[in-house]
Each structure stands twice: as C-alpha cells, then as structure tokens.
Image (spheres, rainbow, N blue to C red):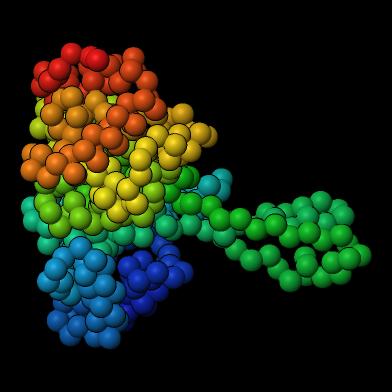
Amino acid sequence: MAKEKGKYEQWLHGFVLPLVAGGDVRISGVMGQRELDELVVDPTITGMRDERVQRIAEARHAVVAEILIDPFEPELEQDSLKLAVAMQNLLFLSHPGTAGTLVRKSKLKQVADWSAQLVRELPPPETVRELAERHSMLHHLFDLGRDDVRVSFWAGRREFKGAEPPPRLLKWGAVRRVREERWRVSFLTEAVSDAGQRSLVLALLSASPLTDLLEPLRLDPPLELYALAPWLREPLVARAVADRYLTLGFSKLGAPLTDALLRLYNQKNSKHECQVATRFVCHLHLLRLLSSPRQESYLPELQALAAGQPALRDFFGLFAAAQRVGLGRPDDVAHDPKLSKLVDAYAAACATLCGAARVLELEGVMSRGVHQLLLAAAD
C-alpha cells in the first residue's frame, strides 16, 4: 500500500464497510504487523472519524441493535481492527489466485499462522456488549462467497472463479453453441479444507462466540457447545439465539443441534455446560409449542416433520428424555395445570415418535452428561 495520507481510506470503503454492511468486498493483498500498527494510529480511523468510519459504525450499530436493548455504535478500535485484518488475510488466502504454482506455500502458511495468532491473542469477551461488538464485525463470516462461471462452447470449456468471462467468449452464442453456467461457492467451505486457514477460522469463531452460535447449520467446522453454552445463561444472548433457531425451523435445526448435544454429553468435565445447553434446547421446544395452535395430539405433526429426516427422532427424543432427567421444563410450569398438561402431551408425543427403547438410551447419555440420576424408572 502506498504511503500517502489517508492510505487506508480505500480499505475502509472497499473491504471493511462491505464486510460489516454487506456487498462485494475487495481484497488488496496481505496485511501484516506493519499495516496493523499503522491502522491503530491512523487519524482517519482513531481521531477524525470520517464518513467511512461513521458508515461502518452505523452498520455495526444495526447488528448490535438486534441483540441489545440499549444498542451503541461500536468504535473501530484495536480489537476490531485485528479482526478486520485477520478477515482480510483469510479472504486473500482463500482466493483462487493463491493456488497457482508461482505462489510459495510456505509464505501462505506464515500468513495464516500470524493471522490466527493475532486473533488468539484477543482477550475473550466478558460482557454481552463485548460479545455483540465482536459479532458486529464478523456476522457475515458464513455468508461470504464468490460467483464462479463456466462457459462451454463447441471447442471446449473454460471456468472463471470469482471473475467474469471475457465478452469474446460469449459472442456468436448460437453458432458456437455457447452455454453459460453460474454457481455460488462458500469461501468458508473451501477455507476449512486447508489446515492453516481452518486454524484461522476456528480462532475467529472462538473470538466471536455469538457468530459461532448463530450459525448452527454449517457442516464444517461443526457446532461445538462446550465453550458456547455459558453464554446461553445470558437472557439477551439466549433470546437472540432462540429467535434465530426458531426462524431456521426444527426441520433444519434438529439434526445438527442433536449431534452437538450428544458430543457435549460425551465430553469430560462438562456438567454445567450440558445442563445449560439441555435447558436451552428444551426452551426452544416450549417456545415453539406455545406459539403453535393447541392440538389433541402432537404426534401427527412430529411424524410429518421426521418423515424424511430420521435424525429428527432423536431431537424430539431428547426432549422426552430431559423431562425424566429434570431439565425439560421450568419449575413454574407446574403452577399452571393447563400448561403442564400441554407439555406432558407434547413430551408423550416426542417419546412415541422416538420409541421407548431409544428414549431410554438417550436418557442414559444425557444423565451421564449432566451428572443427574433419572427421576423415574421406564414405563
């Protein structure tokens, strides 16, 4: 980057702003310690708060407002800049151009290792405000991707990764039998297949637990609840996550959330995390139950949901198992006989769908994880 005054203005406008507000991000190259040191003292960022910095703050404010009752405009301070620099390098490393034979793999590994270490050195967020602040920088982490194009013609075909084909390839379409195909590629899907980039992705998720929690459907890296569960004790965080999960729907959410819970139950020294995560998942069931029309039997609805997804049977079976372990509902449900009866009917439908034998197995796994004895013998 040139050394002129305000040299990072284009970076703010072309990369940081679309990173937080959405849009096409522009990657100019690798950023290292020298660039980071210059960013931290750049008056455009730290003092003057020009139009670009203000627009970034407003975009982050919109994200924070979805979580906090009293939202604020986050500053583009040192921790936020470190996250932005790490994201810049991650996108650079995942660019198709870095796969060329002229690019030194050792250099790419150094960039990945330095960026991951930069993020790991960030102190963990201690408050919901800090959690929201981190998330406002990384909330598009799972949305970023590139548009690839394949142009087929009578003499062969060519592919363009993240770039438009030259107009000459599309000329005389009928004569040359030109066919154009387009598809979206998630940059994260490719990034995690590389050891260095994967390490950086995991560091970013660790630095921003809310970003991690709010994207349960990704295949890799899978959702791991051990470090995330304590945040579910925070009402504002639990509300935001519950809203996200219910919006996704049980048909999509059930399988990955079940897998995450079962992994957590088998993790050592995770009693409190298991209890919190189990209560939260049961809370999701109760929220969905209360927002749905009351029925004489919930079994047909559950059977329809699980018809094409056998894994959902365990998801509903875990709710039935939690009733017997003592984590399936708040104590004050018992104060309302009608509500208690409603929950009992839903739990019975979950148990029937899953099957008595499998519910017993899930009870055993759950009870070991939460370190609680079963409340009653099997019926």
Would residue 95 be found to the left or right of residue 140 on screen? right
**Res 144 → quadrant:** bottom left
- Would residue 198 appear left or right of 148 to someone viewing this image? left
Which corner quadrant of the image does residue 196 belong to?
A: top left
On screen, residue 244 above or below 328: below
Q: Look at the image and tell me in which quarter the C terminus lies.
A: top left
Question: Is 236 above or below relative to 345?
Answer: below
**Residue at 12% across, 45% down:** 336
Residue 121 spot, x, y in % from top left: 16, 48
Occupied quadrant, residue 300: top left
Residue in the image at 56% along x and 56% along y: 184
Camera-nearest residue between 348 and 100: 348
Q: Nearer the viewer, residue 262 or 149?
A: 262
Does residue 48 appear left or right of residue 108 in this picture? left
> Whole-percent x and y of residue 225?
23, 37
Q: Residue 265's x, y, as percent?
A: 22, 25
- The correct choice, above or below, for 372 with respect to 15 in the image is above
Q: How many marks?
A: 0
- The spot of residue 138 in percent (x, y) is 30, 59
Residue under the point 48% across and 38% down:
304
